[in-house]
């Protein structure tokens, strides 16, 4: 078992592989009652076209399969596995994103029992027609719930404007229409492709005896029914590694269309401004650093400490609900700025002017030092929250970096890095707007 | 982790300390308490103005730069209502000193900062000659508060809940929205709000919670230095060392407990039409039970069986068995004593859903409670209580709710109370509650 310690954070984690090649991170939390386990697979809504095990050609599945699968794994031949978590007093849930799906629980008691349930939840699929039909109507209501949220309409229009072909154009849950075509067979195909332990990661944090966890997992995994799921037909053995062939997404740098203006049940106009990432496909350190640099750059540009934000607030164009973020994924990325304002066109114009001005002058050393201090504090504070902590390790693993290294990366970022990114990423040519006006 | 130590530092000003080195961050939360009366709008506007800046940190830039220099310290101000009590809440968080380079004392800086924000606002002379809040900020925050109140409709489920409460509690203080009313905003003036601000500092009950690594004696001394002085207490003219007291606060506001729920004569049904994809159903029940009553424990177990969790009857029947909803749950407002059921459903499924929900309550009244529903609820409640110690914010919420209701129950004692609840208690509780209002937001 590999042990890593960080002096500054006063934290330690352990890494090892369990049977089937499942990588596992264990972060001890002495003195805490709460415990968490997250089991995640590198399979998300953008994975729509890939080669199924044992086939030669690409198969394209309907939008929304990973999310449907996430719902459906809770259903077993005896009923819903949720009941068993509930009987133990655990909190449990799952979530699907663009690039991965995560299953997790938190509890204060019965960690081992809950952990065994998590393994069963993920490694004992049961896809049956009636169950799938019932789940479909629940997911339909979920989609309708999101359709009533202004932010869904805004972001959907924004994504469709930014991207021409990329699967991120479609909501993570798919559409009311696309989910009609999802069958037990399709769920099975997706499962067989992506739910191999070699494509997954397990993160555990808490005041727990880790040796028992290893024992429990390996015992469960040695059951013939489980083992057979991952045994290759040709060799008769479980391979530790799995090679998944996803169809390469060919998305141009150019945006699809500049603007979308919609009407909806909102109190006053809302605007989303999006910048399309062109530096995609970075890996590991370069990828993580680019994300960090962009976040810091945006904070300097338009965070509450910036002259631009003060100006916009003073003009009454933004309010405390103004928000912005950058998100980088495997094959796409974007920066989004969101505001509620009586005059969206004016806000858009002012932001563009503010960006041009910042690009001319650049940020100063002092400002960057301040924002780096902020980053360091945030990276430290993240360890107080179990969810953040597990998320940090899951994402670090999928990006093949050491979770503790984020602090090293942060320190290495220079004024030049940030100013360069300011000038390249926020290029007017690659931005779109989405506006939602009251009916 | 130790429980909060309560120290009275001046009349109706209490400090609650939980020293611990468990966390990487420390937290200060300071609450001003008010009755939930016609002043809600003033309170909401005051909170926004104080957050805009003070003499030393006159704008958001200066505030943010100060916070960033402390390695991502956090600061926020908001209002909230619990039961028929209104609160203004100030929060300051910062990474504990031992994880940071240098020797600055973040907790000391946090206290000093909060004091300045709360008591030393930016003032200007108004046309009447009296000092008032800075006019440009005042006008902007009037506008922002108006927008905030109007934007409730953007969150359809929150809007539906608020509308249900408004009509259900139309003669009780609880009807008031925590951010107030648009029509009350523009009659407030900068000078009148400043006068109100001074009155608040001198007369509102204050609770200050601190969680993190510190020496209690130091924090007590610091807090006394700030809050046992003007403008929080009245200046004493002849103060001889031998008579040194905490000082006085004449006119302290007392906050009455929530009004008891009236009896329900008949169910009220309200349908409101808006452009929504999905219908939003809210059903408001009166429980005649609050945190002041012993029966609250049976009530919380009842709510767990009924709708608080995914193993509850509502989620199982409305979602899992019937596929009528994705989201369906019930929430217990423990200080006013209401239970609100929420569900997002198709427009044409109103009748069957309401019948199904009513049917679930009948089942519990008849004693039809499964092992999973009962023991799962007890275990989930136990899990929530045990997790409190790992989350400073949740811990403060827990103590605040209890302390204002005159209960000093430790987490241990609360756990023991839940263990005493029987299925019979749950059925009895179910027979006690009354459906008051059904509200449906539909197209």
Image (spheres, coloured by chain):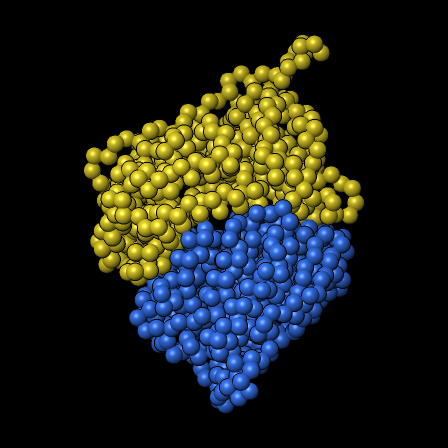
Chain colours: A blue, B yellow
Q: Nearer the viewer, residue A3 or A296?
A: A3
Q: Is residue A225 visible?
A: yes
Question: In the shown orientation, is residue A100 left or right of residue B375?
Answer: right
The number of numbered badges drawn on the structure is 0
Residue found farthest to the bottom: A56
In this view, the residue farthest toward the left is: B266
Taking the view exactly as shown, the residue that stands out farthest to the right is: B102
Judge from the rendering whether residue B214 lies leftward or rightward of residue A314; answer left or right: right
Image quarter (top left, top right, bottom left or bottom right) of the C terminus of chain B: bottom left
Quarter of the N terminus of chain B within the rendering: top right
Classify residue B296 by image quadrant: top left
Residue B211: image quadrant is top right
Q: Is residue B390 above or below residue A119?
A: above
- Location of residue A100 in the rendering, given as x and y in whole percent from the top left corner: 53, 69
Classify residue A180 by image quadrant: bottom left
Residue at point 32%, 33% (across, down): B288
Residue drawn at 41 percent across, 33 percent down: B291
- The answer to whether B238 appears left or right of B140 in the picture is right
* Residue nearest the viewer, comparing B35 with B414: B414
Where does the image place residue B364, in percent across and percent down from the top left?
28, 45
Residue A57 percent coordinates (x, y):
48, 89
**Which residue is drawn at the image coordinates 39% and 57% (left, top)?**
A83
Vertical comparison of B41 with B240: above or below: below
Q: Residue at x 60, y 30 (%)?
A: B5
The x and y percentages for residue A173 are 43, 67
- Residue B37 visible here: no
């Amino acid at each position: 078992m590999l042990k890593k310690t960080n002096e500054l954070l006063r934290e330690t984690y352990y890494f090892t592989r369990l049977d089937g090649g499942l990588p596992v991170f264990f972060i001890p939390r002495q003195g805490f009652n709460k415990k968490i386990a997250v089991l995640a697979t590198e399979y998300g809504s953008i994975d729509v076209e890939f080669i199924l095990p044992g086939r030669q050609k690409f198969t394209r599945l309907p939008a929304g399969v990973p999310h449907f699968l996430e719902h459906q794994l809770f259903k077993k031949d005896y009923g819903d596995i949720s009941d068993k978590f509930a009987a133990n007093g655990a909190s449990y849930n799952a979530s699907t994103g663009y690039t991965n799906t995560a299953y997790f629980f938190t509890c204060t008691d019965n960690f081992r029992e809950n952990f065994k349930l998590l393994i069963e939840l993920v490694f004992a699929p049961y896809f049956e027609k009636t169950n799938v039909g019932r789940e479909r109507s629940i997911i339909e209501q979920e989609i309708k719930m999101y359709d009533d949220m202004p932010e869904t309409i805004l972001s959907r229009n924004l994504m469709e404007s930014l991207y021409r072909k990329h699967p991120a154009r479609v909501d993570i849950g798919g559409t009311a229409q696309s989910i009609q075509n999802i069958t037990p067979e399709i769920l099975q195909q997706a499962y067989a492709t992506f739910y191999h332990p070699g494509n997954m990661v397990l993160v555990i944090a808490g005041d727990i005896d880790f040796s028992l966890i290893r024992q429990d997992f390996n015992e469960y995994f040695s059951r013939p029914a489980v083992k057979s799921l991952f045994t290759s037909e040709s060799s008769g053995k479980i391979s530790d590694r799995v090679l998944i062939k996803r169809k390469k997404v060919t998305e141009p740098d150019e945006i699809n269309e500049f603007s979308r203006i919609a009407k909806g049940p909102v109190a006053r106009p809302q605007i989303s401004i999006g910048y399309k990432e062109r530096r995609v496909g970075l890996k590991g350190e370069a990828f993580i650093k680019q994300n960090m640099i962009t976040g810091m750059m945006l904070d300097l540009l338009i965070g509450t400490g910036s002259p631009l934000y003060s100006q916009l607030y003073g003009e009454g164009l933004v309010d405390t609900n103004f928000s912005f973020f950058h998100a980088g994924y495997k094959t796409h990325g974007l920066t989004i700025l969101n505001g509620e304002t009586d005059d969206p066109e004016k806000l858009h114009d002012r932001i563009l002017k503010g960006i041009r001005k910042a690009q001319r002058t650049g940020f100063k050393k002092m400002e960057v030092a301040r924002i780096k201090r902020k980053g360091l504090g945030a990276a430290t504070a993240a360890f107080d929250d179990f969810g953040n902590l597990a998320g940090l390790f899951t994402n670090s693993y999928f990006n093949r970096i050491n979770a503790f290294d984020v602090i090293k990366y942060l320190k290495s970022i220079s004024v030049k890095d940030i100013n360069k990114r300011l000038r390249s990423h926020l290029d007017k040519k690659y931005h779109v707007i989405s506006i939602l006006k009251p009916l | 982790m130790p429980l909060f130590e309560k120290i009275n530092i001046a009349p109706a000003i209490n400090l609650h300390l939980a020293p611990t080195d468990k966390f990487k961050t420390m937290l200060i939360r300071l609450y001003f308490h008010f009755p939930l009366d016609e002043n809600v709008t003033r309170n909401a506007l005051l909170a926004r103005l104080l957050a805009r800046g003070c003499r030393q940190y006159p704008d958001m830039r200066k505030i943010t730069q100060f916070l960033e220099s402390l390695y991502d310290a956090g600061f926020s101000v908001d209002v909230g209502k619990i039961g028929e009590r209104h609160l203004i809440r100030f929060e300051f968080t910062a990474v504990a000193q031992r994880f940071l380079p240098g020797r600055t004392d973040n907790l000391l800086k946090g206290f000093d900062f909060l004091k300045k924000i709360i008591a030393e606002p930016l003032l200007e002379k108004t046309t009447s000659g009296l000092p008032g809040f800075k006019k440009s900020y005042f006008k902007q925050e009037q506008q922002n508060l108006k927008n905030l109140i109007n934007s409730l409709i953007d969150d359809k489920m929150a809007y539906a809940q608020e509308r249900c409460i408004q009509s259900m509690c139309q003669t009780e203080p609880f009807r008031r929205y925590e951010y107030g009313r648009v029509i009350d905003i523009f009659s407030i003036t900068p000078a009148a709000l400043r006068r109100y601000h001074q009155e608040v500092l001198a007369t509102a009950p204050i609770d200050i919670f601190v969680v993190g690594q510190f020496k209690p004696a130091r924090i007590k001394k610091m807090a006394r230095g700030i809050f046992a002085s003007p403008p929080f207490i009245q200046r004493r003219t002849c103060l001889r060392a031998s008579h040194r007291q905490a000082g006085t606060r004449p006119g302290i506001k007392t906050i009455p407990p929530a009004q008891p729920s009236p009896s329900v004569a008949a169910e009220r049904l309200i349908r409101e039409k808006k452009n929504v994809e999905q219908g939003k159903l809210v059903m408001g029940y009166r429980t005649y039970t609050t945190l002041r009553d012993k029966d609250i424990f049976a009530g919380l177990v009842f709510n767990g069986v009924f709708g608080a969790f995914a193993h509850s009857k509502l989620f199982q029947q409305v979602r899992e068995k019937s596929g009528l909803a994705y989201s369906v749950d019930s929430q217990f407002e423990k200080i006013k004593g209401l239970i609100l059921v929420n569900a997002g459903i198709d427009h044409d499924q109103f009748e069957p859903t309401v019948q199904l929900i009513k049917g679930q309550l009948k089942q519990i009244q008849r004693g039809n409670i499964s092992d999973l529903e009962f023991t799962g609820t007890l275990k989930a409640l136990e899990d929530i209580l045990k997790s409190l110690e790992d989350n400073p914010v949740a811990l403060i919420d827990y103590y605040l709710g209890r302390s204002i209701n005159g209960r000093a129950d430790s987490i241990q004692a609360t756990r023991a109370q839940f263990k005493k609840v029987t299925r019979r208690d749950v059925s009895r509780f179910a027979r006690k509650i009354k459906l008051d209002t059904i509200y449906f937001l539909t197209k």
